[in-house]
Amino acid sequence: MANQKLQVIPTITEAIQLGIKNVASLIATIVLYVLTVWIPYLNVGTTIGLYRIIIDMTKGKIINPLSIFNKENFRNLGNFFLLLGLLSMGLSAAAIFMLIPAIVMGIAWGYAIYFLIEKKMTPVKAMALSDKVTDGEKWNIFFIQLVFGLCFSIVSGIFMLIPKVGVVLVILLAIVFAAAAVALEAVMYRHFAEKAEALLAEAKPCCHKPEPEAPAEPEAPAPEAPAEPEAPAE
C-alpha cells in the first residue's frame, strides 16, 4: 500500500463514500467550526481539533463534533505556531520565483501539520517528512484537488441559475462540499501516513548482533602441593 500512488478517480470515490458514512457528524463539525472560528484563541484549538478529526477518520474512529473543543487541542501551541511561521516564510520565499514553486512547496508541505500533531514531531522534521512522502505524487495531489474544486464550481454555478432558492442551495452545497473536503483530506492523509510509517521504520537502526565475546583466557593450573617425604623404613 505504501508503494502505491494516489489515483484521481478512486481517491475521490473513496472520499465520497467516507463522507456519506460520516455525513451528519462532518456537517455538524463544519457548522460548529464556522460558528466559532471568529472567537480569538478558541479558534486555534478548534482548528487543531479539525486536524485531529481528520486523523481519527483515517483510523476508522467515530467522529465526535464536540471534540474540536477538547483541552488537548490547546497543548503544544508553540510548535504549531512555529510550524505555521516556517510554512509562511518558506512559501513567501518560493512565491518570489513566479508563484509556481510556492504551489509545489505548498503541496509538498501540506501534511506537515498532521505529522506535527499525530507523531509529535518538531516543525522542521514534520516539514521534511511531508516533503519526502509527497515526492513523486505532487501532480496526483494537484489534479485530485483541481477536479474536486471544479466539481463544486460547476454544481454551484448550476444552482445559481435557479431563481429565488439558488443562493440558499449554494450555501447548503458549500457546507456539504466542506464536509466532503474533510473526507477527501482524510483519504489522502491515510495514504501518506502509511508511507511515512514505512519510511520511519526503514530509518530505525536495525537490531545489531551482539559482538562476539573474546575467548576467555585459560586459567593457569593451580600449583601442586609438594609431596610429603616418605617415612624411612624400620
Image (cartoon, rainbow, N blue to C red):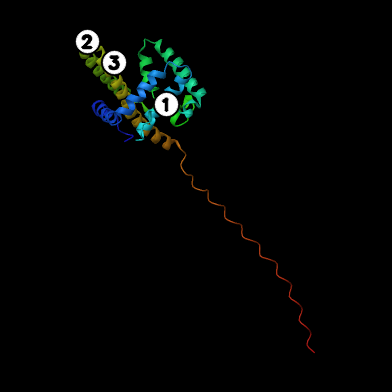
| Pointers 3 and 1 in contact (C-beta within 8 Å) | no
Residue in front for this viewpoint, 199 or 57:
57
Which residue is at the far bottom?
A: 234
Q: Residues within 10 Å of mark 3 (few under 14, many from 20)?
A: few
Coordinates of residue 96 in the picture (x, y in percent): 41, 10
Q: Is residue 214 above or below residue 107?
A: below
Give the amino acid type for the residue marked by disc 1 in the picture.
Answer: Ile
Residue 222 image-quadrant placement:
bottom right
Residue at mark 1 = 68
Q: Amino acid at mark 3?
A: Ile
Residue at image mark 2 = 164
Q: Earlier in the sequence, mark 3 or mark 1?
A: 1
Is residue 42 among what the camera can see?
yes
Report which residue position mark 3 lands on.
171
Looking at the image, which residue is at 43% across and 12% down? 92
Instruction: Give 221 or 95, whichever is nearer the viewer.
Output: 95
The residue depicted at 23 percent of the width and 26 percent of the height is 9
What mark, if any, has residue 15 been given in the picture? none
Q: Quadrant of residue 87?
A: top left
Picture coordinates of residue 120, whole percent (x, y) = 47, 30
Could you tell me how far apart the alpha carbons at marks 1 and 2 are, in whole angstroms? 35 Å
